């Protein structure tokens, strides 16, 4: 499979507090962390789902914007 078969979906993560952690998780038989970022209040991160990234875990106060809608981490 090519990367273009997995690409296309992006999420925007807006940190509403200092120290928001974003974890990229691998796809495949074993799910593992492959990347981490720490965001400070007001920072944005644009993440893309790829051949290697199948999920994103977010810890802290953040608003996540997707093509499916907006999610606030404190309200879920």
Image (cartoon, rainbow, N blue to C red):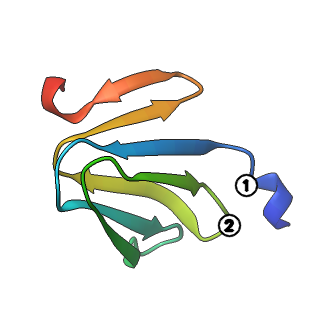
Between discs 2 and 1, the one toward the N terminus: 1
Q: Which mark is residue 51?
A: 2
Q: Is residue 69 left or right of residue 19?
A: right
Callout 1: SS: loop
Query: Is residue 1 visible in this depiction of the protein?
Result: no
Tag 2 near tag 1, CB within 8 Å: yes
The image shows residue 27 at horizontal and vertical percentages of: 52, 67
The image shows residue 31 at horizontal and vertical percentages of: 39, 70
Query: Which residue is rendered at x = 16% and y = 23% of the image?
Result: 75
Q: Is residue 57 left or right of residue 8?
A: left
Callout 2: SS: loop
* Residue at numbered disc 1: 6
Query: Which residue is rendered at x = 84% and y = 57% of the image?
Result: 4
56 vs 10: above or below: below
Distance between mark 2 and mark 1 Cα atoms: 6 Å
- Can you tell which quarter of the image residue 5 is in? bottom right
The image shows residue 62 at horizontal and vertical percentages of: 26, 41
Query: Which residue is rendered at x = 35% and y = 74% of the image?
Result: 36
Residue situated in front as seen by the camera: 69 or 38: 38
31 vs 57: above or below: below
Query: Is residue 38 visible in this depiction of the protein?
Result: yes
Q: In this view, does 62 lie to the left or right of 36?
A: left
Query: Which residue is rendered at x = 42% and y = 67% of the image?
Result: 25
Q: Is residue 7 left or right of residue 36?
A: right
Residue situated in front as seen by the camera: 21 or 14: 14
């Amino acid at each position: 499979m090519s990367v273009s078969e997995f690409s296309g979906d992006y999420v925007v993560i807006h940190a509403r507090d200092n120290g928001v952690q974003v974890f990229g998780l691998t796809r495949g038989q074993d799910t593992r962390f492959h990347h981490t970022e720490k965001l400070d209040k007001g920072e944005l991160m644009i993440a893309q789902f790829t051949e290697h990234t199948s999920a994103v875990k977010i810890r802290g106060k953040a608003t996540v914007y997707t093509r499916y809608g907006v999610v606030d981490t404190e309200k879920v």
